[in-house]
Image (cartoon, rainbow, N blue to C red):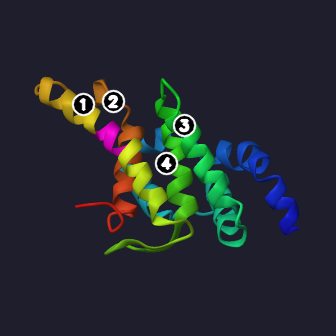
Amino acid sequence: MKQFFGQHIDKLFQNLIVPNITINQTAISLFEDEPDVYIDYYFRNSEIQTRRAAAIELMRAISRSYDAFEPFLRNQIENFTSLPQRDVQSECIILGLTIDGSSKGFRDVDGCTQLYVKPEIIYFCYQNIVKKSLGQVHDWIQNNKNDDVLKNFNAMHLATLIRFLFYFRIYIPK
């Protein structure tokens, strides 16, 4: 079984896990209707008996049991960061894979205390994805002080960036 998962990890993630962890209309509706419930589910992974929860659990089982996860994640991140034009949905997927696949031990006080991947991957994502996106938000705010940020930026994308910082706060520079 281990050999099978190792050989088919790309297909498994692309066909089963990624479609079920992406931000869909149900998540957007929950965010708009009950933001406190959404934040609890999203930041603490406390939702149960959903396709997303099952996909995340499968991804975590793969990441802790198969050495093929880290190379898969590295490849996905490298492919994403090499794109000339990045879209918000793809960025959320990459960060979601990193957050949910890398997180081994989590405490509200410390964030992720143990990882299934090397901390260098977390730092790379921070430097090349999160920091750049937050820099764009910051620059926009500086030039548009009286405008609503959510008119120009996707709320779910911002939540994903914040979630990354929340989870990996002990692995990124202060």
Q: Amino acid at mark 1?
A: Val
Is residue 149 something that shows in the picture? yes
Q: Which residue is mark 3?
A: 80
User: Which type of secondary structure does the marked residue at label 1 adopt?
Assistant: helix
Crowding around mark 4 (Cα neighbors within 10 Å: few <14, some 14 to 19, many 20+) is: many
Magenta segment: does it hold 43? no
User: Which type of secondary structure does the marked residue at label 3 adopt?
Assistant: helix
Give the CA distance from mark 1 to mark 3: 25 Å
- Of the residues under marks 2 and 3, which one precedes in the sequence? 3
Please tell me whether mark 4 or mark 3 is closer to you in this view: 3
Give the CA distance from mark 2 to mark 1: 6 Å
- Assess whether mark 1 and mark 2 are in contact (beta carbons under 8 angstroms): yes
Crowding around mark 2 (Cα neighbors within 10 Å: few <14, some 14 to 19, many 20+) is: some
**Residue 149 got which mark?**
1
Residue 106 point in image, percent of width and height: 44, 73
Task: Identify the residue at horizontal 62%, vertical 60% (top origin).
Answer: 70
Question: 30 left or right of 142?
Answer: right
Give the CA distance from mark 1 to mark 4: 21 Å
